[in-house]
Amino acid sequence: MNLNSSSIRKAVAALKKIDEQLAYLAALTAVGIKPLSRWEKPLGDEPEGWIGKLDLRTSAVSRTVQSGGKVTETLFSRTEAYIRFYENCFADTPIDKSPLVQRWEGFLFGFPPCCVNAYIQQPYQKNDLEPEDQKILFHWACEGCLITPLLLPEYREVYEFVAKL
Ligand SMILES: [Zn+2]
């Protein structure tokens, strides 16, 4: 996916007007940095339409919370199989932050496994990233990470693309 095509720029700019974080997440997923993304609320028809213009499939998944209530998550991915997998594992289930679930989510969301393991042992341990690098990621980098520095230029490029729209 070429971020500089005019139809892609138009769709990401429209999403940015609705929510900048949603636009960033959609663009990261559209270029393939993240296999699947989860927006932790329902999407209206308009943002869903723009996400579709980025060649992403979407799905609304209902989850339950401890109080017994229900919440709707919106998934998007270039790959139908990742959406189906998430639905099969998690649709209509309670929100769960167990280590096993964190590992599945890390795989789906494109998080390095070393960072996921470090986070499971203890969240937000000291790492070597500059705060302005850490803040554009969706995972907390582990100390001495070998993967995150390779991903950062890709995240940075998409982040700046969205910021400049
Ligand atoms: Zn790591």
Image (tube, helix red, strand yellow):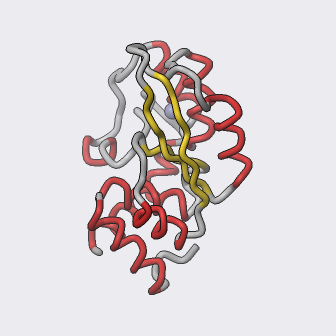
Nearest to the observer: residue 80 or residue 140: 80
Expressed as whole percent of the image width and height from the top left, the position of residue 140 reads 40, 32
Residue at 36% x, 29% y is 127
Residue 124 percent across, percent down from the top left: 35, 23
Residue in the image at 34% along x and 39% along y: 129
Q: Quadrant of the C terminus?
A: bottom left
Task: Name the outermost residue toward the right.
Answer: 81
Give left or right: position of 144 versus 79.
left
Query: Which of these two is toward me, 77 or 72?
Result: 72
Q: Quadrant of residue 15?
A: bottom left
Total marks shown come to 0
Res. 128 image quadrant: top left
Q: Quadrant of the N terminus?
A: bottom right
Left or right, 10 with reference to 118: left
Q: Quadrant of residue 131?
A: top left
Vertical comparison of 36 with 145: above or below: below
Residue reaching furthest front? Answer: 69
**Residue found 61% across the figure and 32% down from its top:** 91
| Above/below status of 150 relative to 120 | below
* 128 sits to left or right of 68: left
Give percent across and percent down for residue 69.
41, 22
Residue 34 vs residue 85, the one in the foreground: 85
* Residue 18 rendering spot, x and y as whole percentages: 29, 62
